[in-house]
Image: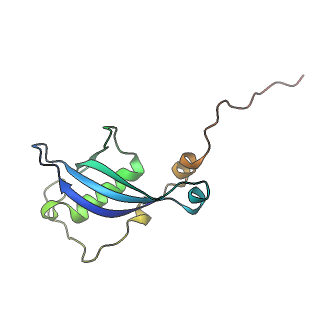
Amino acid sequence: MSYDFISMEDTGTRTGDYIVRLRRTPSRISRWFGVRVEDVAYYGRCDRWHAMDGLPARSCVRRVLERVWHERGPNGSDCCGASAKKPVAESPIAPACIDLVQEASEGSFPASDPPAWTLGR
């Protein structure tokens, strides 16, 4: 999976959270199995990110969101308040999130039961 930055908006609440929208593009293998490009949204800030259903973001997505926060966050600040440099041009965030094991497990068909093992006497 690769992720491209779409937008970042302030939620308008006192928590200081932001909503980040990303475009998730599946790998070639996933597309072969019918997975389509999808726009997804997460809320949070710094290193605390959640999907819109309230569950914590997966580690792969969290790394992408933290990178977006450091590059495009409010006033160019990171979690500690130190200033960060904003990039000049928009760039895809695809290389930040390559976890082959996670991608393979997401794209695999869910098995109902493991194979039965016998001692074979």
Which residue, as the protein is rendered here, is positioned at the far right?
Answer: 121
Which residue, as the protein is rendered here, is positioned at the far bottom?
Answer: 88
Residue at (53% x, 52% y) in the render: 103
Relative side of 105 to 3, left or right: right
Q: Is residue 98 above or below residue 86?
A: above
Residue 13 coordinates in the image, percent (x, y): 12, 44
Residue 31 coordinates in the image, percent (x, y): 56, 59
Residue 12 coordinates in the image, percent (x, y): 12, 48
Residue at (30% x, 63% y) in the render: 6
Relative side of 112 to 3, left or right: right
Q: Is residue 67 above or below residue 89?
A: above
Report the colour scheme.
rainbow
Residue at (20% x, 70% y) in the render: 85
Residue 42 coordinates in the image, percent (x, y): 30, 49
Q: Is residue 113 above or below residue 45?
A: above
**Snapshot quadrant of residue 70:** bottom left
Which residue, as the protein is rendered here, is positioned at the far left?
Answer: 14
Count the marks: how many? Answer: 0
11 or 82, nearer to the observer? 11
66 or 40, nearer to the observer? 40
Question: Which quarter of the rendering shows the C terminus?
Answer: top right
